[in-house]
Image (cartoon, helix red, strand yellow):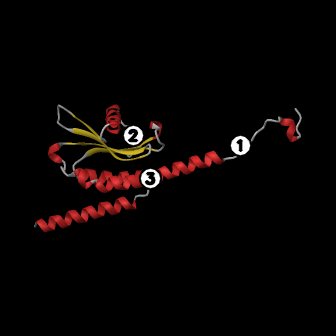
Amino acid sequence: MATKLKRQFVQESESFVHSLLDAQDIATLAAVATRQLVALGFYEVQLLWNQLPGDMGSLQTSTLQPPDPGTLGLLESARRLNGLSQRTDPASGAVQLVWVVAQNTGLWVALSAHFDAANVDLDWRAKLGPLSARCQSLLYTQRLQVDVHQRRLQQRPVLKFGKGIEHFGCRA
């Protein structure tokens, strides 16, 4: 019996990893991650990421909804501290966590999710190791795209119009 359960876990894990590898952008990766997190007992799952280094105005979310102020506070705390921040609702005991899954030179991906301690797989972080690795890979690619774009902007020729309109044979 234990062998059958172990085999099922390995198959599910392999399927999760294959789905992560198939994702070519963070939005697709977020959909894959959300399915896995719900299966592990999480709810109100939201991945958050920035598109440009250091620009909170470029914040994207997997739900297409802006994060609430409490989530933003946990995100800032997680980014400043050890990558994980959480709060517990005293009335229900539900926990909301924000975990910075990956970072790369000003770019980052974070996970916001809620769970009840009695209903969540306690080994969730170990099972999400492949998510962190794939996010890091996609952030690296995104960082290269940002760098190439900035390089192109720097190399554009600048037209100088210092001689006035007469220089082009036109008269005012």
Which x, y percent locates residue 62?
Answer: 38, 46
Write down the residue under mark 3.
140
Locate residue 107: give its quadrant. Answer: top left
Q: Residue at x 30, y 63 (%)?
A: 15
Q: Is residue 23 left or right of residue 148?
A: left
Q: Earlier in the sequence, mark 2 or mark 3?
A: 2
Which x, y percent locates residue 60?
Answer: 43, 43
Q: Residues within 10 Å of mark 1 (few under 14, many from 20)?
A: few
Disc 2 is placed on an element classified as loop
Decide: is 7 above or below 115: below
Query: Residue farthest to the left?
Result: 1
Of residue 81 and residue 74, the one placed in the foreground of this image is 81
Q: Residue at x 37, y 61 (%)?
A: 21
Write down the residue under mark 2.
65
Which x, y percent locates residue 154?
Answer: 62, 45
Q: Is residue 172 left or right of residue 18?
A: right
Q: Residues within 10 Å of mark 3 (few under 14, many from 20)?
A: some
Q: Does the rendering let one see residue 32?
A: no
